Image (cartoon, rainbow, N blue to C red):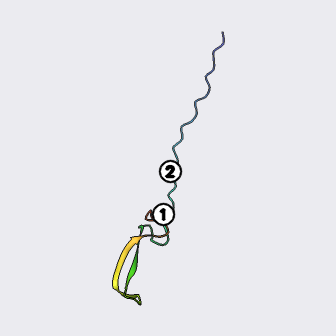
């Protein structure tokens, strides 16, 4: 009788790290942008700012 050969066991490999998308250029990865507050009929800018979602990444922070 001849011995039955087992197939070779595949080598275990470490999983690759998930690639991280680059941060958004507009908001620098924070997801928020600041804009000057404009008031009046002529839309003059005052010394106040408001924050809002980044229009490019919609608050995700990644491009």
* Residue for point 50% across, 58% down: 20
**Is label 1 or label 2 in front?**
1
Give the residue at the far left of this rendering.
48
Q: Is residue 55 left or right of residue 40?
A: right
User: Which residue does the image show at 48% across and 63% down from the upper left?
Assistant: 62
Q: Which residue has dot 1 on it?
A: 62
**Mark 2 burial class by Cα count in 10 Å: few <14, some 14-19, many 20+:** few
Mark 1: secondary structure: loop
The residue located at (49%, 67%) in the rendering is 24
Helix, strand or loop at label 2? It is loop
Up-down relation of residue 33 to residue 60 (above or below): below
Of 10 and 24, which appears nearest the observer? 24
Q: Is residue 13 above or below residue 57?
A: above
Expressed as whole percent of the image width and height from the top left, the position of residue 50 reads 36, 77
Task: Specify whether 21 is left or right of 5.
Answer: left
Instruction: Please identify the residue farthest to the top as the structure is shown.
Output: 1
Horizontal side, residue 57 vs residue 44: left or right: right
Q: Tell me the residue that label 2 is attached to.
A: 17
Position in image of residue 18 (x %, y %): 50, 52
Image position of 25 (left or right of 32): right
Sort mark 1 into few (<14), some (14-19) or many (20+) by Cα contacts within 10 Å.
some
Q: Position of residue 53 (x, y in %)?
A: 41, 69
Q: CA distance from mark 1 to mark 2?
A: 17 Å
The answer to which of marks 1 and 2 sits earlier in the sequence is: 2
Locate residue 44: give its quadrant: bottom left
The residue positioned 42% from the left and 67% from the top of the image is 31
């Amino acid at each position: 009788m001849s011995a039955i050969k087992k197939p070779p066991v595949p080598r275990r490999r470490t999983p690759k790290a998930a690639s991280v998308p680059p941060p958004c250029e507009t908001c620098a990865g924070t997801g928020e942008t600041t804009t000057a507050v404009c008031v009046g009929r002529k839309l003059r800018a005052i010394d106040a700012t408001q924050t809002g979602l980044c229009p490019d990444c919609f608050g995700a922070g990644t491009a």
